[in-house]
Structures are given as C-alpha cells and as structure tokens.
Image: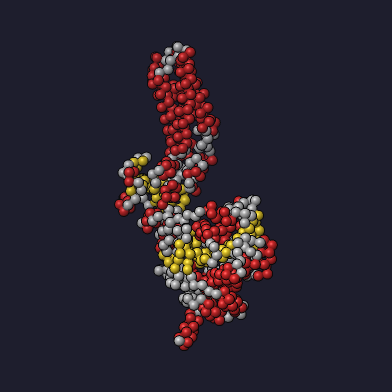
Amino acid sequence: MSKIIQNYLARRVLSRTAILVIDTLMIVFSCLLMYLIAYGFEGLTQDVRRDGTTVCLLLIFFNTIAFVSLRTFSGILRFSSFTDLLRIVYALILGYAATLISIVILMKYNEVFYLSTQTFISIFSLNTFLMIFSRIIVKEVYETITGNNIKPVNIFIYGTKQAGISVAKALKGNNEFKYRVLGFISDESHMVGKEIMGVTIHENNDNLFRILESKDVRTIIVSPQKMDEIKNSTLLSNFVDHDISLLTTVPINEWDGSLKSREQIKDIQIEDLLPREPIRINMLDIASNIEGKRVMVTGAAGSIGSEIVRQVASFNPNSIILIDQAETPLHDLYLELNEKWKFLRTEIVVASVSNHSRMDKIFSRTRPQYIFHAAAYKHVPMMEVNVSEAIQTNILGTKVISDLAIKYNASKFVMVSTDKAVNPSNIMGCSKRICEIYVQSLAKHFDKNEGKKTQFITTRFGNVLGSNGSVIPLFKEQIKRGGPVTVTHPEIIRYFMTIPEACQLVLEAGAMGKGGEIFIFDMGKPVKIVDLAKRMIKLSGSTKVKIEFTGLRNGEKLYEELLNQAEHTKPTHHEKIMIANVREYEYQEVIQKIDSLIRSSYEYDDMRTVRKMKELVPEFQSINSPFETVDRVLEKIAKESI
C-alpha cells in the first residue's frame, strides 16, 4: 500500500494554477478570520463588510500580480526550499505594500472608508504564516508518507562569510541533501563563540576535533570562498588526517539561484591538499611574446603539450601547429580548439619528431617563430626496456627539431625537461639530460660562431598532477575498484605541481629566456607518495582499501632532485623560477657522441647503447636495473686507468 501511495505521489503534482488559487484562498481566509476576530459576528455591520470586501479584493489583485511577478507558485510544494519561502515573503510584502498605498489613497477621497492598522497587520501576518506553513506541512507529510526517513548526516560548515551562510541556508531549506548543520568553523577570532542560524561558531584548533567527535560529525563542507583561501594550506589536510570527510560546493555564481542538487556538492580533490603555495605568473609579459606569432607545439596531444596549446591559444597567436604521433587525442584537441577558438588558424600534423625529412617539410611550409618542444617518451619503467625508442624519440627528436629551428630562423625554442635528468638513474632521465646537453651546447656554439638569433631555453620540473600515467589517476582507479593501492616503496617522495602551473612556468621561462639557460622551478616541498595514497583513501570515505608496497621499479629513485651537487642556481625576476648553473659541453664533442649514440640505437644492442649514454653523462648510475652491470664495467676500467 505504501509503495502504491509513493508511486502515485511521484507521478502527481499540483498544477501552478491550483497553487495560485490556493494561495488566493488563503488571502480571503486571512481577511475573513481577522475581521471576525476584530469585530465579532455582531460587529460585522454592512459598512464593515463593505470595507472588508474592498480590502480583500485589493489584496487579491495586488498579491496576484506579485505572485505572478515572483513566480511563487512555479515550484513543487513538497520540494520547497528556503529560497522558495523567502520568495513568498517578498511577494507578500510587495502585494501588501501596494494594497496599503491604494487604501491610503482611497481613505483620502472616501472619508467613510475605514481600516485599522492592527487589522491590516494581522491579516498580513496570518497570510504569511499560512502560505509558509502550508508548504512546510506538505513537505513534511510527503517525507513521512514516502518513507524517506534516511538519518541526516551531521555536518559543520567551514566559513562564516556570506558563502558559508548561503551553503548552510541552502542545506537547511532542502531535504534532498540530508545534512544537519550543527556548527560553523571560523579562522576569525572575533567570530568564535558567536552563533549563526542557532548554532555555535568554533575555532579551528585541536579542541575542534573533540567537539566534532562529541557531536558525531564526520563531514565538513568547506564554503567555496573559504576553499579559495585555504586550499593550499595544511588546514584541510589536517581534517583528512583525522578521518573527517571534506566536501565543498560549486562557486555561488554557478548555483542558478540556489543550491538545488547533490551534483552541486563535490568532493575536495587530493590536489587541494598538497602542501604547496599557488604560483602566480605575469601573463601580460607572456602574451606580448606570443601574440601574432606562428607557434609550434610538439607532443601537443600529451598532458603538458595540450595545456601549453590551450594557454598559447588564449594569447592570440597568428597560428598554431600541433605535432604528435597520437592520432585520437590530437584529433580531440583539434575539436576543442575549433570550439573554443573558432578563428584561430590551427594545423594538426600526425608525425614523429624524429623523422627529419617530414619535419623539414613542415618547417619549410609553416616557418614557426616560437617552438615548444614537449614531445618525449616519459615512463621510466617502459624506457628501461625500450632503450632505442627513448634515444630515437627523445634525443634524435630533440636534435631534429632544434636543428630545424636554427635552419628556419625560429625566434625561440623552449624544451620541456624533467627533474629525472638530474643525476639520472634511468634511461628516460638520462635521455632527457642528453637533450639538455645538446640544446645548451648548440645554443652556445651558434651564438658564438654564427650569431644565429634562435634562443634555446630548457625548463626542468618534476611530476605533474593529473598528467597521463601519474600516480593520482592510478590511485583513484585503484580506490574505485576497492584496492589495493600500490606504492613502490614506503619512503619514496616526489615533487608535484598542477598541469596549468607547469605550463605557465614554461611560458614564463620562454618569455624571460635569452638563450642557453636551463630554468628550474621551485616546486615547494616534496610529498611522500604513501602519505598521498593514505589521504586519497581517506578522502574517498573508504576504510577497507589497503596499501600494498610493490618494490622500486627499474630505474626508479626514492627521491628526485632538481639540481646535482655540482650545480647551483641564479635567481630571476620570478621567485619560483631559477637558472641552473650546469656543466657546459663543447658542441663538436657533443655532436660526435650523440651521432654515435643514435647510430648505436639502430643496432638494438642495449648494453652497448647504454654504455655510450653513461660515457656522455658520467653521473648516470643505474638503480634497480640490469644496466648496473655497465656501471661496474666502467668503474673497473676507470680504476685500471689510474
């Protein structure tokens, strides 16, 4: 029987006309009852009835206009929210104010007409009560009949400014959310101890967690305004470490009038909990360098390359050439650009950067002025077992693009490198260090001997949050499946930054570079990967997902460096960007060794090829890799030569 009633109510709702008629009848009832109370049956003389009828008709007329204007009848009664009730109050104030003005004018020209102020206020009060109370009753009755008796979740709201109060009001006025607001949290000392909406404001200190436990609060909703203020501090992560679930809402300007659905409340992402300060970039300087230029981006379909493309597109370049081997993501990016930047001249090229003849044709036709070289194989374990591919794509590809940049007089060549190039312990890192060596020696050679105008800039940074193959998407998928979350080693640490920040720094370094520099970025404090995994598990609300240690993979370090011991840095005008003083190589020596290395890669003799890499980069010491045997051979040769 209960199910039948639920199904019936789910299909049936009062029409807007019916709601308007009911609201009008409430006006009539309020007038009749208040006049009856004021005058009694015996006091309802013909004159009083005439005046009362006039007042009632005026109230119906003006309030109907107000109801229609503010659409008080457009919602479904059983889903009425605080905003809907507030709209009713506004409409009644407007309707009654217009009626009062009309009555004052009527009394001026008709001295016989009479209405006491007390009666008018009583009618307004009863009318307001009936309209609000009726909606609350309908809402409660519906909840009871449908058996929707899910126990509400006790929550605190973090933030006591307008955004936080708006969130609390929206949650209180809409039963869909099933949240019970039991308190607020504030960082402002003058607000602590006061009350908002009948609940106390608490300070964010150690005592707060005892209060949360005593009130059975395991969830905190952070207001969108407060989220912007503290997302890069340690305040949020402290809650997660105490097993408190964190939620936030979309910005208030995206509420579409009110907070109406569960989709507008979202989980706080792990990216918001990393201990790092946001990076600020002077985008005007970057724009002046790129505006009106022909820009080429290699590796354009990758995480970094695609974000560089998006940011470059916003700076009004003359044209942009996208080069990548990955057909589908490149096509997706092309569609995105066509949608967001309809008038931008865009060309997509499916090609390998190591194909010299193909790249030469592209350069001769497009004549790029600004080149962002992000094409590279980057996965450490994969490159340990695909040595030749790492050399042919990373090293040969960089050589081809940088040589063509000089041949076709490009203004700037900006290469994306990695912190794994510092004291490399794997093939991928060493291949990127050789790329750095080649680009820097090339820049020095042509600047000194031929005066070529191409400026070569290298940027070096660590792991990028959310990039293809990074740990965060992997952990999210593992948690979704119920675990285990796999971490290679309990002590492994990494530096992190967001994709947009990394790309902004690449653009900034490109703008400030004069040629030959290797720019490194201040990436804040390194993060323990196991701590990252623990926080992600806690954020998911799961208590059963376990962490499993799988052991270091081939070529993997416990920690990454941005500089080796022989290097030091010079500051730039941007506090987050520094110039690394690195060992410089002579171009003629470098070109011979790199050409020999590339030829060796086509023989697919990994041990011989890796030996050539180690001879070119002496600090390359393999870790947890079969190529450690090459290190021992080279050490033996070095000892014998002493």
Extreme residue toward the bottom, this view: 640
Left or right of residue 177, residue 391 in this image: right
Q: Nearer the viewer, residue 75 or 564?
A: 564
Q: Establish if 413 lies above or below 209.
A: below
Q: Establish if 241 lies above or below 191.
A: below
Q: Is residue 571 visible?
A: yes
Total count of labels: 0
What residue lies at 54% left-to-right and 40% top-to-bottom? 11
What residue lies at 45% left-to-right and 31% top-to-bottom? 89
The percent coordinates of residue 119 (x first, y second) are 40, 21
What residue lies at 33% left-to-right and 48% top-to-bottom? 203
The percent coordinates of residue 88 (x first, y second) are 47, 32
Q: Quadrant of the C terminus?
A: bottom left
How is the rendered protein coloured? secondary structure
Extreme residue toward the top, this view: 112
The percent coordinates of residue 537 (x first, y second) are 43, 60
Q: Is residue 337 visible?
A: no
Q: Nearer the viewer, residue 285 or 67?
A: 285
What residue lies at 45% left-to-right and 35% top-to-bottom? 85
Q: Establish if 518 lies above or below 336.
A: below
Left or right of residue 541, residue 340 in this image: right
Q: Nearer the viewer, residue 339 or 457?
A: 457
The percent coordinates of residue 103 (x first, y second) are 46, 18
